[in-house]
Amino acid sequence: MTDALRIIATEEAFATPAQVAAIREVADRTTDYDPDLFLWKRMAGGGPLTDALLDLEDQRIAIMDAAGIAMHLLALTSTGVQMFDTATAISVASEGNDLLAALIERRPDRFAGLATVPVQSPADAVREIGRVVSGGPGLNGVMINSHTNHEYLSERHYWPILEAIEASGKPLYIHPRAPTKHMAAAFRPDNLEYAIWGYAAETGLHALRMITGGVFEQFPRLKVVLGHMGEGLPYWFYRIDYMHRLTGGWEETTRAKLSLTPSETFLRNFAITTSGVNWDPPLKYNLEVLGPDNIMFAVDYPYQESHEAADWIRSAAIPEDARRKIASANAERIFRIDVKAEVTA
Ligand code: MN
């Protein structure tokens, strides 16, 4: 309806043939139930969702055009390379990053992208960030799909990765996956491990662990992006701050001393996207709590519907200056998307 709202969608998934092959291999030899493999077991013979993930320039661009979406900020679909052995993770990540860089070079008007890194091997992850984010094609940040082997980035052996991302001046997008083995059982009845609740519980806990674990004391300029309206965290700011203060002196607590409250840390270091939540009330709430500069539009293609999301952001009951920021201006600033590329769109 609105004529010229420039829309950049910031949590859009793709896959490479090598990633699909590697994840099918993991699925084939895994006999225990693993919620992160559910989708791939269902997609074993291929099908429309696999096709949509593998397609980059045909059906995808037609769907973007029909919905009025100028650009996709792409990243390898969850769980990236985080379920693979280290050697496979390194090769699938670097090949995927090269493919993404070549696509962006061909179509800078339509695509930007986040690098995938082999989190399993922090030294290799740091090298890959140097190769494709800080240097080389200069991808727009890094995506990590929550836990790696049931560990969070609050664990110190992952901090070299965070140091390299902070130094790049580009963000870390923490995307969901199903809960760790430590919390999975409680989600299993009624299949609550997935996007219905488990993803937000897992990813919200991961981000909170990074805050309370002192990650942002060490890396005060690290920018972290969370999807799904902030995975619920902004809604809990008052109680998180209150209880963090109240329980900080308890003997059982070994948590790091913070110079800011958890919510102050979030407001300084985090941005959120609207992925998967095309609904005014949480958008208005987040506009009030976070302000208009750290909220970005996303669809979650191909898992959710592009037209519905784009129509929603064009018509949401929010001020026009906030709409322009959320639709594209914040993404251009935070992900350092080259807006000169826009002219051919
Ligand atoms: Mn997603």
Image (spheres, rainbow, N blue to C red):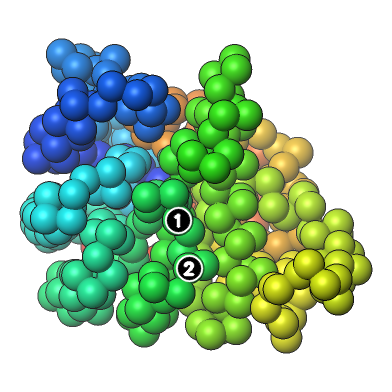
Q: Which residue is mark 1?
A: 151
Do tag 2 and tag 1 residues touch (Cβ < 8 Å)? yes
Q: Position of residue 206 (x, y in %)?
A: 56, 55
Question: In the image, is residue 218 above or below residue 57?
Answer: below
Q: Is residue 71 in view?
A: no
User: How would you rate the neighbour count of disc 1 (Cα within 10 Å): few for under 14, some for 14-19, many for 20 or more?
Assistant: some
Residue 47: where, in percent of width, then height?
A: 20, 15
Q: Report the amino acid beneath label 2.
A: Glu
- 71 or 197: nearer the viewer: 197
Q: Residue at x 25, y 27 (%)?
A: 30
Total numbered badges shown on the rendered structure:
2
Rendered residue at 35%/24% (across/down): 32
Label 2, label 1: how far apart the Cα atoms are: 7 Å
| Residue matched to label 2 | 155
- In the depicted view, which residue is nearer to us: 308 or 28? 28
Q: Secondary structure at mark 1?
A: loop
Q: Is residue 133 above or below residue 239?
A: below
Q: Is residue 259 left or right of residue 201?
A: right
The circle on residue 54 is none
Query: Counting other residues with Cα less than 10 Å from the Cα at mark 2, is it few (<14), some (14-19), or many (20 or more)?
Result: few
User: Amino acid under label 1?
Assistant: Glu
